[in-house]
Image (cartoon, rainbow, N blue to C red):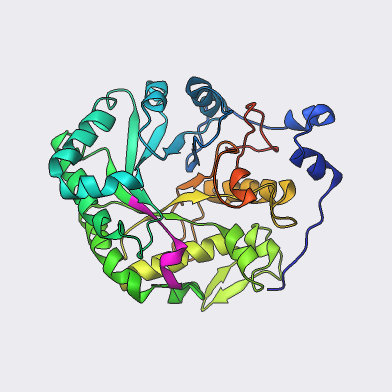
Amino acid sequence: MARQKCNKTGIEKRMEKGGSGALIGLFLLISFNVSNVSAQIGVCYGLNGNNLPSKQDVIGLYKQYGIGRMRIYAPVPEVLNALRGSNIELMVDVANEDIQRLATDSSAAVNWVQTNIRAYSSDVNFKYIAVGNEISTASWMAQYVGPAMENLQRAIWGAGLGDRIKVSTATFMALIDVSYPPSQGSFRDDAKRFIRPIIDFLVRNNAPLLVNIYPYFSYIGSQNVGLDYALFNNAPDNVVWDGSLRYQNIFDAMVDACYSALEKEGGGNVRIVVSETGWPSYGNPPAASWRNARQYVSNLIRHVNSGAGTPKRPGRAIETYLFAMFDENEKQGAATERHFGLFRATKEPKYPISFN
């Protein structure tokens, strides 16, 4: 598809500069219903900022906007205590630096579960444990992911929580060799040694594979991905056919490429949970803009909450976690990394959005 340009509007420019003033009325258009928690949408809560609201205020914001699911990137006690009694479903990561220890010492895995999960489990609604985030097969940590998952699973069962909590890992599209057309999706040859034991674990434990999926990066990295196709703008000329399957957005195509790759490695029954997705509002114009971020997030929520699933898995709800709750001013990397937030540090929404 031809790459399309999207010029910034006056509103967008003011929003990206942090102005509010005349836009207060625009914020009031945001709809929410505290009693109607979104069925499939969660939001990732990162802490790489020095100006973020208190943990208790953040939990209050999740409840205010009916956000029923959260992902955190380490078992931070202050966050876990703030979550007590909230009933928010939680995905909690094992920090990458802890993976080797948990893989090589089963007692360390037991202690980790007792300290970070069991101690809070009576009034914190744990759902997933993600053993690492986007571990590259070239990383020295890759060899420890599978064994750490096994040790943590045994520790979870030992703590009497095996019927409540699923253990998995959060991977990413870099492990996929072929992603187009989606039916040809496959893992890279060098990734198969890493992913096959993980798939076997997921099958045995009826657990999902967590995958971080970012149409934004596909769009900026390829001249063949159109903006409408990346933003869920279902224009008639933005349709990709894969045999009899009709794709109107690249998000579905990426998810289905992962399903095809799983099928080829014996994981046809493994469910995919999208553990991260989002679009930056600033830092790489014109792709990263307030307008594009608003369109992507709003269209994604509508699509996910419709329950339509993907062309390959119709009617199978796509549990999805948006990245991220706030702009994080201490994140490393490109400027866009600090502008994925749905909310400003002041707790104001960055653009009109409804999670339901």
For residue 51, which quarter of the picture?
A: top right
Residue 248 appears in the picture as rendered: no
User: In x, y percent, where is residue 289?
Assistant: 72, 50
Q: In this view, does 116 lie to the left or right of 300?
A: left
Q: What stretch is highlighted in magenta?
A: 169-177
At 56% from the left and 24% from the top, the residue drawn is 53
Instruction: Tell me: residue 286, above or below residue 281.
Output: below
Q: Does the segment drawn in magenta span residue 48?
A: no
Q: Give the answer, above or below, for where 211 lies relative to 101.
A: below
Question: Hey, which quadrant is residue 4 in on the image?
Answer: bottom right
- Nearest the viewer among 344 and 160 is 344
Front one among 320 and 137: 137
Quadrant showing the N terminus: bottom right
Residue 215 in the image, given as x and y percentages of width and height: 58, 59
Residue 178 x/y as whole percent: 46, 75
Residue 59 versus residue 150 in the image, above or below: above
Q: Quadrant of the C terminus?
A: top right
